[in-house]
């Protein structure tokens, strides 16, 4: 029942811990394509967080403008 933003850090930390445990247990470090893929996933997650933050600010500003217009009518 948690929000996506509350759960988002867990998959990213899981990637880090799986890389570390794979290196320690199996003595195998991911190849560059795996690291590139992980970087793409992290970058897309950061972009989504940034975009949602901007949309939330725009939505809040729009509702403030509507509230001011309604207050002027009253």
Image (cartoon, grey):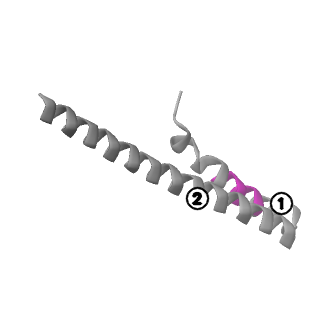
Q: Determine which of the numbered discs, if any, sits on residue 65 in the image.
A: none
Helix, strand or loop at mark 2: helix
Asked if labels 2 and 1 touch by Cβ distance under 8 angstroms, the answer is no
- Region in magenta: 13-19
Asked whether 70 or 43 is in front, the reply is 70
Q: Is residue 45 visible?
A: yes
Tag of residue 46: 2
3, above or below 36, in the image = above
Q: Is residue 17 left or right of residue 33?
A: left
Verify whether residue 64 appears in magenta.
no
Q: Residue at x 11, y 27 (%)?
A: 74
Residue at the spot 61% in from the left edge and 47% down from the top edge = 10
Q: Residue furthest front?
A: 73
For mark 1, give the secondary structure: helix
Q: Nearer the viewer, residue 5 or 64?
A: 64
Between circles 1 and 2, the one closer to the viewer is 2
- Residue 66 picture location, percent across and down: 27, 37
Question: Would you name the residue on which mark 1 appears?
Answer: 25
Q: Is residue 44 above or below residue 58?
A: below
Residue shown at 52% from the left, 54% from the top: 51
Describe residue 45's horizontal placement relative to residue 50 as left or right.
Answer: right
Q: Position of residue 67 (x, y in %)?
A: 23, 35
Q: Residue 59: x, y in percent?
A: 39, 43
- Alpha carbon distance from label 1 to label 2: 30 Å
Image quarter for residue 38?
A: bottom right
């Amino acid at each position: 029942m948690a929000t996506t933003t509350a759960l988002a850090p867990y998959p990213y930390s899981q990637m880090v811990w799986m890389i570390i445990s794979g290196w320690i247990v199996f003595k195998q470090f991911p190849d560059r394509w795996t690291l590139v893929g992980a970087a793409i996933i992290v970058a897309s997650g950061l972009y989504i967080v940034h975009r949602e933050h901007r949309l939330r600010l725009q939505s809040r500003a729009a509702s403030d403008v509507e509230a001011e217009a309604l207050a002027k009518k009253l």
